[in-house]
Amino acid sequence: MESILRLSRVRVSPEGPFVTILYFAAERNSPEIVRLLCKFGAPPSQSMRLSPSNEPTIPLLSYTVLVTEHDLFDTIGMALALLTSGAKSDDVARDMWENFVTTPTKDLAKPTLKDDPQRKWCTKEIREALCRNLNPMQRYFLWKADQQERPSKRKEQIAQGLGLSNLLERHETDLFGPKAPYQGWMDGSKLNNFLCAKSGQRAIIFMDEFEKTSEEVRKALMLPFDSGFYKDRRFGRQLDCSRTIWILTSNLGQETISKFWARHQRVGAPLTGRLTEIVPYFPFNKEEQAVATFKFMRELWNKARKNINTDGNDYLGHLFVNFTDEGQIASHLAARHYDHETDARSLSQAVSHEIETRLCYEFLKQNEEVSNEMNNLALTKFDVRLETSFGDSEIVVKCSGVKAMKHTETEDDL
């Protein structure tokens, strides 16, 4: 691994740019490779020199967003991998993500210092491309990472020495183990191997200080929580964890809850003395509702990108869903459909009803028959926008032709 990292720091050519292996991983859109390289010492906050001279450099995080421009990748996972590995949010101009729901403007931000590095590399052309491709979820993760206090090296060292490294897990590979063929995949992890041993049986898993986990870890847990099934990382077997009880503890809001309880408690000490924690449910605020809505919009974006397979009756595919001002659309759907009782499910249903249904209707209006050969052509583009008429707004979906696409391998191709 050390030899690979040394090779990653050599020039591609004397006249060409100075490119590290992390940039190739970004072009490959491989979060797992990025995490592995960062784990072995590759710095996540680094820049690519455009020429051998002292020219402006593009930070890797911004470059990851720009990859979307031509390859039409979904780079949300890549941006998250870099941020959880230690990349700085300021590697993307701060004014572009501080208000993460609002689409950033194309105007260059005023630098606070004359030698502001953002001023050097973030040219008008690059900023316009970032505005087109930096989506609400990426802006939210940039904002969120800026709010978080990262664990020090000493804290990680002591936690690992005491066998408490699971409290600091930031990646789903730390929790479940790496996938094949990455290094260590045959070893699994404590949690992966426990679920294998207890498949179909009653079991209890206790996870303390759950608030210290990353968004990536929490997303990885959604599948076993929701479906009751989990895929073994070592042998690929589907495991039944539907009878598993998961206990997650957190200290979030402890002081506020204690003050509220002191003012409003109506239950006597004999019972309260036997309650260890009382955990309230807090609904999403307006900004979080919009981000959650965009998450489901992005899932639809990925679903529409999948190849057509007429043999399997998968006719709707090989499409490019172009959301015009994603933040505005997401905020509109959240404001109209969010329900405190059903929470995120109400937002998923809103995207399905308001966008996916209209997309299917517009898709069926096209007169040409669907064939697998269409997968070799350019993507068919469908624009999704919010139109306002007489004070009332509604989602509109229209087919607008084809979207030229540079051919790149996706995970489905591998």
Image (cartoon, grey):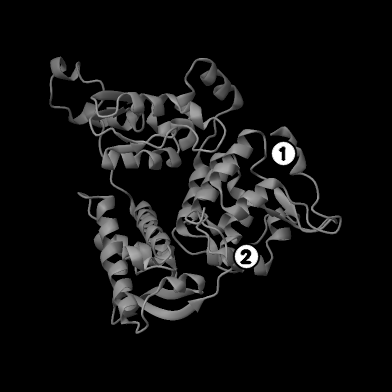
In this rendering, position of residue 13 left or right of residue 154: right
Q: Position of residue 166 (x, y in %)?
A: 45, 25
Task: Kindly identify which numbered label has been placed on residue 4.
Answer: 1
- Does the CB distance between marks 2 and 1 fall below 8 Å? no
Of the numbered discs 2 and 1, the one sitting upstream in the chain is 1
Q: Residue furthest front?
A: 311
Relative depth, front residue between 242 and 104: 242
**Residue at left 46%, top 62%?**
102
Q: Position of residue 115 (x, y in %)?
A: 76, 54
* Amino acid bearing label 1: Ile
Relative depth, front residue between 39 and 128: 39
**Residue at left 31%, top 63%?**
351
Q: Which residue is mark 2?
A: 127
**Residue at left 40%, top 40%?**
220
Q: In this picture, is 284 found above or below 256?
A: below
* Amino acid bearing label 2: Arg
In this rendering, position of residue 252 left or right of residue 54: left
